[in-house]
Image: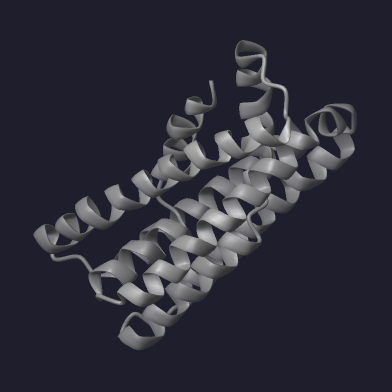
Amino acid sequence: MSIIGIPLGLYGYIFPGNINLMVLDLYTTKKYRLLIYVLSLILIFESVYCFVTLSLLETFKQNTALFKGIEVGSFILIFIMGIWMLTDNRKQNDVIHQNTLRRGIFSIIFHPQQIPFWFIMGLVFNPFMGMQFSMESSINFLIFNAIGTLFAMGIYMYFGGKILGYFKLKIGTLNKSMAYIYILISIYSLINFFIF
């Protein structure tokens, strides 16, 4: 049942975010060598977050304070990313591209949203799969998850480039749009977390 990793990897990266925008930007600006390094970095950190979270699933289930702390940290990081994206000077293309790369790399390495994602996916799918997290089953799952993740990135590179060209959009416009979405989601999530 490790093949379930493919749709989970796809689902985990199909929604727009800093990582996807960075991959799209590197692809449309034809920085292929850097793109290969970035894709490798994505797969490494995705695998680490996935493995650690699923391995510690029982610990997370028993320690709700830790999980809630990770959730709040995620919301705060999303808010900070949104503010950072809003402060980009849209007239300086080089700065926009550099900041898109920096935010993408930062999001790959410090990606606390991955822990709640894998925690929820582990709770939902583990009972159906009866998966014991042995080294062999974990490696198989991680390989299939990597395939799904690469598929999601391929969708962004291929279709994202076409959409940018068709609508004559620039990466700065996408960054600005994502900034507003990030800020709204983080404010809503923090209010929802602390008030409701």
Which residue does the image show at 40% across and 50% down from the upper left? Answer: 16
Which residue does the image show at 61% across and 11% down from the upper left? Answer: 128
Which residue does the image show at 52% across and 58% down from the upper left? Answer: 42
Q: Position of residue 103 (x, y in %)?
A: 52, 69
**154 versus 24 height, above or below:** above
Which residue does the image show at 44% across and 36% down from the upper left? Answer: 11
Front position in the image: 93 or 107: 107
* Quarter occupied by the C terminus: top right
Q: Position of residue 138 (x, y in %)?
A: 65, 35
Q: How is the image coloured?
A: one colour
Looking at the rendered structure, the number of numbered marks drawn on it comes to: 0
Front position in the image: 16 or 52: 52
Q: Please state if 166 lies on the left or on the right of 192 as rendered.
A: left
Q: Position of residue 35 (x, y in %)?
A: 38, 69
**96 versus 128 height, above or below:** below
The part of the image, by quadrant, that contains residue 57 is: top right
Q: Residue furthest front?
A: 136
The part of the image, by quadrant, that contains residue 66 is: top right
Q: Position of residue 191 (x, y in %)?
A: 68, 41
Front position in the image: 190 or 63: 63
Q: Please state if 169 lies on the left or on the right of 126 as rendered.
A: left
